[in-house]
Amino acid sequence: MSRIVSVGISEFKIASAPTILMTYGLGSCVGIALHDPVALTGGLAHTLLPAPVRGMDSMVKSAKFTCWAVDLMVEELIKCGCVAERLVAKLAGGATMFEPQHRTTHSGIGERNVTAAKEALERRGIPLVASDTGDDYGRSLEFNTVTGVITVRALQRPIKRM
């Protein structure tokens, strides 16, 4: 039987099999899952913003920012016995939650979060093997550390497994 671990906004968690990592309410936020299929260990981050704004560069790195979440998870996964070269990634979220005519100064955060995640993965050489991003609806996801499968749920949408 798998244990279930919830990942909150601006957090990441690392877990070994058999564990289900879950996060809820991904609107413009991005869920980043990293998995080592040999170690059966993975990490899930629920990032809020693409990067800190000027003047915040010296703050402590946290999973609040998409640009840092991948590095933070990789460091912890390696401590847990994972091999960086075996890691694969999956993304979900990054939606545009408002119609274009109603956008505010926060418009484009979802798209910028997805871009920041892809850039961070590329810097680390981690392949992105699946994603369910963009569009105009929120998502919740479950990440199975045994299989590496991400289950994405959204209101009035079919369940996606990737």
Image (tube, rainbow, N blue to C red):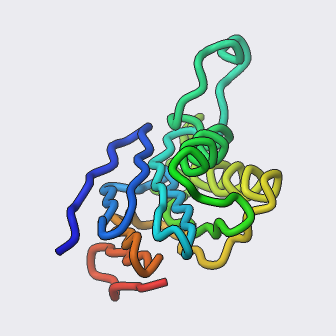
Please give the name of the residue rendered at 22% of the width and 61% of the height, measured from the top-left corner.
4
| Left or right: residue 142 compared with residue 12 | left
Give the image location of residue 116, x and y in percent: 71, 49
Q: Is residue 115 visible?
A: yes
Please give the name of the residue rendered at 59% of the width and 34% of the height, measured from the top-left corner.
105
Give the image location of residue 92, x and y in percent: 51, 66
| Image quadrant in which you'd find residue 37 | bottom right
Give the image location of residue 81, x and y in percent: 56, 54
Tell me if residue 8 comes above or below residue 18 in the rendering: above
Q: Nearer the viewer, residue 74 or 45?
A: 74
| Image quadrant in which you'd find residue 16 | bottom left
| Left or right: residue 73 compared with residue 138 | right
Q: Is residue 107 visible?
A: no
Please give the name of the residue rendered at 69% of the width and 71% of the height, measured from the top-left corner.
128
Give the image location of residue 132, x and y in percent: 53, 74
Tell me if residue 89 comes above or below residue 9 in the rendering: below
Quadrant showing the N terminus: bottom left
Please give the name of the residue rendered at 58% of the width and 18% of the height, measured from the top-left corner.
60
Q: How many marks?
A: 0
| Image quadrant in which you'd find residue 2 | bottom left
| Left or right: residue 73 compared with residue 84 | left
